[in-house]
Image (tube, helix red, strand yellow):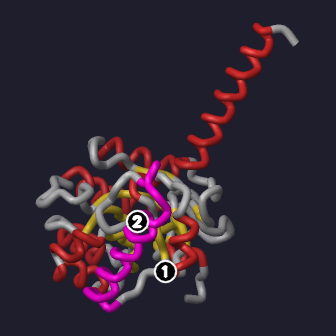
Amino acid sequence: MTGPHLAALSASTVCASSAFMAWAVRGRASSVFGPSIYRGPRDRNAIALTFDDGPSESTPEVLELLDDYHTPATFFQIGANVLRLPEVARSVHAAGHEIGNHSHTHPLLCFHSADFICREFASAQRAITDTTGFSPTLLRAPFGARWFGIGQAQRRLGLRGVMWTVIGYDWKAKADTIVDRMLVGAANGAILCLHDGREGRANPDIRETVAAVKALVPRLRDRGYKFDTVSRLLCPTI
């Protein structure tokens, strides 16, 4: 094989490897770094509404809306936010919603060591359990980016990895756009991802998220969908 052909083959191999790694890290269906799900069964007209990055000062507004609509949700909480706002964290559990582990400080896990990743989720697990009395069984990686070591953390803590079927990009999109994305992605077993916080920031502006929830939940109910927590979506007998 000539030099140009070898160079072309090498470049092609690098591109393929890069594409695979990108999918392994961020692909919603990827379980390369640890077991993960991105949707529930397709045989029930049930969906799960999830919120990341809380608790925040704005979480009570989301809770009020969900209470008005009698809609359960799953909140993937950041441990440091739980320690900063323990009463808000407890109010999520008291309202009957599920809490998942979203790391302690919301770092991008890529290129961190397995020990670092384990510490992040172990610290969040302690913060959530000690504060709310609820011990999460679900984990969602910050930014949805998995890495070497997350599987080890899942095994040690007994956590199931959860991605999403559709994400609203509600930290930057307007409410109408968020709703449209969610409606397009909604289907039996779908897991929808929104945010009741903005990473670790205090007093985040989530007005577009709140407006989207206000419009989205009634429209999904009109389509015949039932709302479940992620755990009940995956196992209806819970």
From mark 2 to mark 1, how far is it between C-alphas?
Answer: 14 Å
184 over 97 or under it: above or below: above
Q: Position of residue 95 (x, y in %)?
A: 29, 84
Q: Position of residue 3 (x, y in %)?
A: 78, 9
Q: Position of residue 128 (x, y in %)?
A: 32, 81
The kind of secondary structure element at disc 2 is strand
Work out whether residue 16 can be spotted: yes
Q: Which residue is mark 1?
A: 137
Q: Which residue is mark 2?
A: 50
* Amino acid at dot 2: Thr
141 over 233 or under it: above or below: above
| Part of the protein shown in magenta | 109-133
Q: Position of residue 212 (x, y in %)?
A: 30, 54
Q: Would residue 232 be counted in the magenta stretch?
A: no
* Number of residues whose C-alpha sits closer than 10 Å to that of mark 1, classed few (under 14), some (14–19) or many (20 or more): some
Relative horizontal placement of residue 31, taking residue 154 as reference (left or right)? right
Of residue 204 and residue 150, the one placed in the foreground of this image is 150
* Amino acid at dot 1: Thr
Q: Residue furthest right?
A: 1
